[in-house]
Amino acid sequence: MVIRDIYFLENIQKTGSLVVGVYEDGTLTPSAAKLDKNLNGEISKKVKKLAFKGKLSNSEAFAAENETFHKIILVGFGEQGKKFSNFEFEQLGAAILKASQCQDSEISVLLSQDDTNVVSNSFPALVAFGLMLKSWNFDKYKSKKDEKNKLKRVNFVVTDVETTQAAFNELKKLSDGIFLTREVVSEPANVIYPESLANTAMDELKALGVDVQILTKKDMTELDMGALLGVAQGSVNEPRLVVLHWHGNQNSNEKPIAVVGKGVTFDSGGISIKPDEGMYEMRYDMAGAGVVLGLLKAAALNKLPVNLVGIMALVENMPSGSAQRPGDIVKSMSGQTIEIMSTDAEGRLILADALWYVQEKYQPSTIIDLATLTGAIVVALGHEFAGLFSNNDTLADQIKASAEETGEKVWRMPLSKHFDESINSDIADMMNLSKPGTRAGGTTAAQFLKRFIKDSDTQWAHIDIAGVETTKDDLFMCSHGVTGFGVHLLYDFLKKTRCK
Ligand code: BES
Ligand code: ZN
Ligand code: ZN
């Protein structure tokens, strides 16, 4: 379910319930105060009586005495005079949703510039965006939907309808990308496997003008992708490499920017099989590829003027009589050989060939890969930050800036010669694990990927999203389940760095 009926209006709708803002000290926001006068002080009297303090995320609902509205819903706007950041506007939207979704099927929200001390008059679009993102849940397999949530339609009463609507139109298309990511990542592995996910990419993106190419096992064999194929060989579900090209800036010869996603549609660990506990969560191990898909959709829907290549490396990692063994040695497309120490460190193997492929075919100036790569990054950063690794400070800073803006937070982690050497093998060019005792598993995995970046002039960043692709907390614009972390972050990054 998701709330999509969102309207921006100049005047208050005289239906449903009314949402008004209250600051921490109990005073009404200017737009609420104006209305309060017309209602003979009904709101302010009630705020006093309830001793309501409008801390952010506080709320209270009561039946209206006037004839016009069913209920009046108070929502905390926090400290008076405080300047909201973009992400805080989204959080305000989430708070409005939480306060009102069980109250009525329609609400009208009063939002004027004076309420939040902002210069931009399109800010209600961000509030609406946060509300919409937060309202999404994955309930398609539930025969009986949750009936507590009544809310269907939201009217924002704003000062500048046109500007707000224009800003929201872009955000709505971005949310279409985010929802696509959340949907495919949420789907179980019996529904989403390499072939079906590749077909979804084709169905979703071709019509939007994205060039979609699907490489099969045969194509990858011809390309000598031994590292990716080794992971895939244990499964009856054959691998796919999806190559997406959005050529948004037709007139320029600018080198593309590439995003590459790990798409292990199920990671059992292979012969190095995982323990049973929590293994079901490995249906989410294709989240990186899911982000690539959603990002391309958002970029194409909004016609971003960028030259963007997306690669989804899709395999299923299974144990079987034909599966890869620990101790095997495979040859990657780059020619470098890899000693397989654990078949459960499979993400780096498939990315090795995907990274090499995109460089051979497109010579990108910048490559960003996203992967649910290591449990170690979750130990280091928990579920709040993704791990960011990069060979380039400018790129890392740009990604960090977008992370701050969007609330999809990253923390930069180190790379070093010592950690690079820790993956040397005695009998091959490298191992897919580091020497025993090295620790720093997030970094050693990143060092492995770095060996597949051909040229140190290529800006490269690796984002380990193992801890943030799903959430049980309230950290992202998502109630629980799959977050879609990365789509908004990279969309913002593309806008800021490539769309001037
Ligand atoms: N897909 C996992 C990483 C993962 C762990 C993602 C937890 C999401 C949540 C990855 O393929 C894996 O199994 N990594 C191993 C690497 C180890 C064998 C070096 C890990 O982290 O345990
Ligand atoms: Zn694994
Ligand atoms: Zn994995």
Image: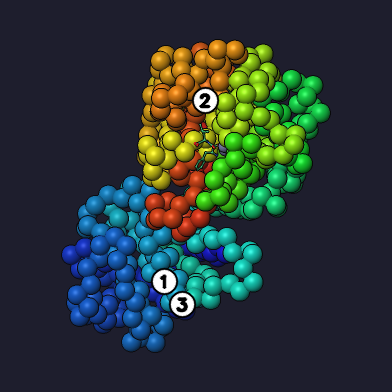
Which is in the foreground here, disc 2 or disc 1? Answer: 2
Q: Compared to 235, does 483 lie above or below?
A: below
Res. 180 visible in picture:
no
Structural crowding at the residue carrying mark 1, measured as other residues with C-alpha within 10 Å and reported as few (<14), some (14–19) or many (≥20)? many
Answer yes or no: do the residues labelled 3 and 1 have beta carbons within 8 Å? yes
The amino acid sitting under disc 1 is Ser
Q: Is residue 8 visible?
A: yes
Query: From this viewpoint, which residue is outermost toward the right?
Result: 218
Q: Which mark is residue 100?
A: 1
The yes-or-no answer for disc 3 within 8 Å of ligand 1 is no
Q: Is residue 111 above or below residue 439?
A: below
Q: Quadrant of residue 45?
A: bottom left
Mark identifier at residue 433: 2
Query: Could you tell me how far apart the alpha carbons at marks 2 and 3 are, in whole angstroms?
Result: 54 Å
Point out residue 172 in the picture as x, y percentages from the top left corner.
55, 52
Residue 378, image x, y percentages: 42, 40
Per the rendering, the mark at residue 104 is 3
Quadrant of res 316: top right
Q: Which residue occupies the foreground of this view, 451 or 60?
A: 451
Give the mark, 2 or 1, whose residue is nearer the N terminus. 1
Which residue occupies 24% across, 80% down? 46
Query: In the depicted view, which residue is nearer to us: 326 or 495?
Result: 326
**Rendered-image quadrant of the N terminus:** bottom right
* Label 3: element kind: loop
Left or right of 204 in this view: 410: left
Disc number lying in front (2 or 3): 2
